[in-house]
Image (spheres, rainbow, N blue to C red):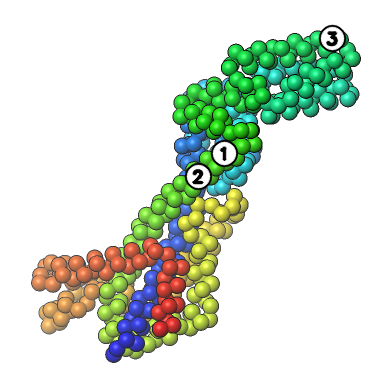
Amino acid sequence: MGLAAIVQVIAGVIFVYILLSIVVTEVNALLARATNMRAKNLRSSINGLIEDPVIQAKVYTHPLIQLVKAETVAPTQRLSGAEAQKIVKKPVNAVDWIEPKTFVDVVLNTIKADSDQKLFGGLLNVIDSMPAGPERRGMRALASRIISSGQGMQELRKALPYVNDRRYRAALTDSINQIEEEISQLGLDPRSNVALLAGIGRIENTRLRSALSTVMFSASSTKAAQDNLEIWFNNAMSQATASYKAGMKKMSVLVALAFALVFNLDTFHIARSLWDDPAAREQLSSELSYAVQSGELQSQVDASAGAADEFSASGAESDDILGDAVEAGAAIANQLQDIQDLRLPIGWRFAPADEQYAAQSAAVDANNLWNYFPQNNPEGWLSLLGMKFLGIAATVLAAAQGAPFWFGLVNRVLRR
């Protein structure tokens, strides 16, 4: 026995790691889907961005977002803090990804909706009361431009002399004067998006108001402000992804620990057994080589990678929860059967040893639970338990690294 035997033992142990890692990934995906973990993580992350519960409620129920299972709350609808909290805490929908531009547009429109009405409501009412025709369409276009970007107030004033009806001309002039007076009282630049800035100024939450004010005042235009807010949102989603991955990593450790304990997947015991049994070592090496060369193992690893711990790749999710659960359960069962079919020294048994073979059994049989009780194995139970703990721990930590990591490594080992 030389280098070839060492390589076969290492490859055999890695084979177990790959199969167990696939099982762990499938279980993680099943649990994440069943508990809406991604959507909850998304909501938690956005909670950290938008700390005002009223704005949260309006954004979360917006038709383009629909993060929670609740009726849509109109941007101008009045809500108390308690009412908003109830809406925000409702169960989440299966939404684990939001387009950054969509999010920014919804947030900005929500913030400035009330200010739009207060600043420009009178002007819009006058325009809507005008007779249908080119004059009303032109005035409406200019007003829309002012509301969306803050640009165009001078153009609107210049257009007033062309309004034929003196009554509407006077009403429009009064509305424009009132708007400019209110803008002056707010201390805002009339060329800026005054409705948005006024809306930001009314936000009760200090941190959110400060963050949005900084972004808006440091931007040279509304488009620049939107771009800055998208960056703000993307940075938060990057942190959310890291947080989700960390959570899934912890779950991987727990799931791997459960399977390692139930099936007695002890790295050191498996490696020692393969080292002592050349026939088993050769058989396992052949099975691994076939699985790699046939592409079967590659397809299993690729399939599990799709259910790995990415925060979100798209917003699309299947609605067939039961079907997905059955499919995932079948995949998990198949992987566990593959591990069983390797005919490795795994699994537990409880078989009291007779006096003649008690000492020998206690010394070598790490699969017999009987040997781990002090009264049955007074001289060897502690060392046996210590080695078992280390072996299980090694398996758990290895499985938590993921199947792609071990598959890449086993390819390098087999090429030696």
Distance Cα–Cα, label 3 vs label 2: 52 Å
Q: Measuring from the top left, give residue 40's x and y in whole percent.
A: 48, 44
Q: Which residue is mark 2?
A: 235
Residue at screen point 50% across, 55% down? 310
Q: Quadrant of the N terminus?
A: bottom left
Distance Cα–Cα, label 1 vs label 2: 11 Å
Residue at screen point 53% across, 28% down? 213
Q: Earlier in the sequence, mark 3 or mark 2?
A: 3
Of labels 1 and 2, the one closer to you: 1
Q: Is residue 283 above or below residue 380?
A: below
Q: Measuring from the top left, give residue 99's x and y in whole percent.
A: 60, 45
Answer whether residue 94 is visible to the viewer in this image: no
Distance Cα–Cα, label 1 vs label 3: 43 Å
Q: Are the residues tagged 3 and 2 within 8 Å (C-beta)?
A: no
Q: Earlier in the sequence, mark 1 or mark 3?
A: 3
SS state under label 1: helix
Q: Is residue 112 above or below residue 165?
A: below
Q: Measuring from the top left, give residue 396's x and y in whole percent.
A: 33, 64
- The crowding category of the residue bearing disc 3, from other C-alpha atoms within 10 Å (few below 14, some 14 to 19, many at least 20), is few
Q: Is residue 32 above or below residue 223?
A: below
The label on residue 228 is: 1
**Residue 77 occupies which quadrant of the picture?**
top right
SS state under label 3: helix
Direction from residue 100 to residue 175 in the image, left or right:
right
Answer whether residue 236 is visible to the viewer in this image: yes
**Residue 133 occupies which quadrant of the picture?**
top right
Q: Which residue is mark 3?
A: 167
Q: Foreground residue, 222 or 104?
A: 222
